[in-house]
Amino acid sequence: IVVLVPESGDGIQAMKAGLMEIADIFVVNKADRPGADRLLKEIRQAINLRAGNALKDIPAHHGVDLGKAMRKERTTDAALVEGGWTIPVLKTVAHEGDGVPELLEAVEKHRAWLADSGELERRRRARARIRVRDVVDRELRRIAWRSPVVGDLLERGLDGIQEGDATPYSVAAEILHSLVGGQAAR
């Protein structure tokens, strides 16, 4: 869930921060404030643009149908269907409880969709893969930089770089070869 508020430029910041790609549910909180409807529109446009739906009904350049271009934007809370999930864009005024039941319903629907579609297991597997890789990367760095052999290879390699006989890549290849043998070339 990505929660944004009007009046703070969150719409632009969300697009810059890559939040448009990670949210399963968007919420505009403090929707009773000025700018809330504009922010809702920006979010819908951004995620429709991401999906390639933003201008699908408008002909390009010559023959532009201004009737289509000026048609009022759809006002449904669903902005994008992605992999079978329709990403809702909801309004809340949390301190008054407005929109909170709808948000909870969206969360429950999303959880059910994740389980039914197999997406929950796919995401869990992807997260586990990233975690394992991070641990291996961290441990390999720890092993490498604590090794006296690697330290010696690095110092000799730095001398070679200064003398023009080696490059950072050739030194790194030598260090990797010392750590994993012939496996580094694969």
Image (tube, rainbow, N blue to C red):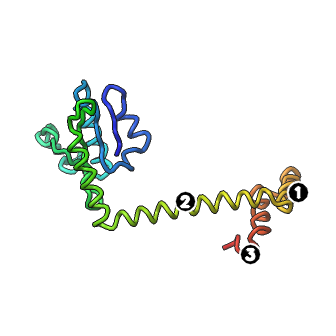
At which x and y percent is residue 50? 33, 49
Nearest to the observer: residue 26 or residue 182: 26
At which x and y percent is residue 47? 30, 46
At which x and y percent is residue 182? 74, 75
Q: Which residue is at 57% across, 63% downward?
A: 132
Q: Earlier in the sequence, mark 2 or mark 3?
A: 2
Residue hosting label 2: 131
Mark 1: amino acid: Arg
Residue hosting label 1: 156
At which x and y percent is residue 128? 50, 63
The reply, left or right, for residue 183 in relation to residue 175 is left
Mark 3: amino acid: Gly
Q: Which residue is at 66% across, 73% downward?
A: 186
Nearest to the observer: residue 108 or residue 79: 108
Q: Earlier in the sequence, mark 1 or mark 2?
A: 2
Q: CA distance from mark 2 to mark 3?
A: 26 Å
Q: Earlier in the sequence, mark 1 or mark 3?
A: 1
Q: CA distance from mark 1 to mark 2?
A: 34 Å
- Image quadrant in which you'd find residue 16: top left
Q: Are marks 2 and 3 in contact (CB under 8 Å)?
A: no
- Element type at mark 1: helix
Of tags 1 and 2, the one toward the viewer is 2
Q: Classify 10 Å Cα crowding around label 1: few (below 14), some (14-19), many (20 and above).
A: some
Residue hosting label 3: 182
The reply, left or right, for residue 110 in relation to residue 144 is left
Q: CA distance from mark 1 to mark 3?
A: 21 Å
**Is residue 122 placed above or below 37 in the rendered structure?**
below
Nearest to the observer: residue 64 or residue 31: 31
- Element type at mark 3: helix
Q: Which residue is at 44% across, 41% downward?
A: 17
Q: Which residue is at 79% across, 65% downward?
A: 174
Q: Classify 10 Å Cα crowding around label 3: few (below 14), some (14-19), many (20 and above).
A: few
